[in-house]
Amino acid sequence: MRLGSSTNMVAVWGVQLDWSYYVLPRDFSQCVPECAPPVSTTSGVTFTPVPATASGTTNTARTEPQLQATGRPILALDGWAAGSYIQKASINDVAILGPAPTRAQFVTGESSSIRLTSWISGQCVSFPYLNVKSAETSYKPLAFEAVGTTLDWSFNGPNNTLNTPRGFNTFVACSDGALYLQTGTDLPSGNCTTTRLKTGPYY
């Protein structure tokens, strides 16, 4: 079922898109206990014990962690995709590009992994990793997963452009929000272009 209505239609890159198909209204929900934080504390992420006080009581021995995370967004740098941001699709684990109001935040975790610290769903997610998936084509899909399989990401150069461990720094962006890592010359069908990705400021 498609989410939202025609009021969610926006013009991006000259194409009218219904971003509500990919993302839900922005909602930075606090983590619940079953959403375990990473074992190691990463830069920009703070865990604050918050007392769980029952009604009519003044104190309790139990505390529950709440996530208060500050991370950086990752956005497209080139062409008509410039200014669009990486985020997690609401219908699956796919990494997509979308508009600024629904941009996600990321931190660099252990082994130079890239981990999602916020998502625009009402559900809590346990800091999924940004991974490159295998594909027969030279353009490889990206996904957010519980286990990190793509490590040693780096941000290089004056623009802090994103690079893979093998040195690839070109991505494919399509007008439907699809995002891929480019390792060759193949391109998906439809309105697609190549772009680099960079980090944005903390917010």
Image (cartoon, grey):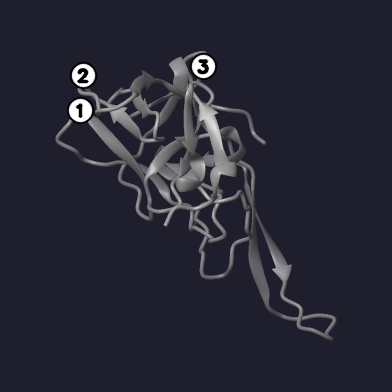
**What's the CA distance linking mark 1 and mark 3?**
25 Å
**Lateral position of residue 166 relative to residue 83, left or right:** left
Pointer 1: what residue? 138
Label 3: few (<14), some (14–19) or many (≥20) C-alpha neighbours in 10 Å: few
The reply to whether dot 1 and dot 3 touch (C-beta < 8 Å) is: no
Return the residue nearer the eye: 147 or 121. Answer: 121
Label 2 amino acid? Thr
Pointer 2: what residue? 185
Mark on residue 199? Answer: none
Give the secondary structure at mark 2.
Answer: loop
Q: Residue at x 59, y 50 (%)?
A: 25
**Lateral position of residue 69 relative to residue 126, left or right:** right
Label 3 amino acid? Asn
- Taking the view exactly as shown, the residue that stands out farthest to the front is 6
Numbered disc in front, either 1 or 3: 1
Mark on residue 159? Answer: 3
Q: Residue at x 39, y 34 (%)?
A: 176
The reply to whether dot 1 and dot 2 touch (C-beta < 8 Å) is: yes
Compared to residue 145, the image places residue 124 above or below, namely below
Asked if one can make out residue 126 in the rendered structure from this viewpoint, the answer is yes
Label 2: few (<14), some (14–19) or many (≥20) C-alpha neighbours in 10 Å: few
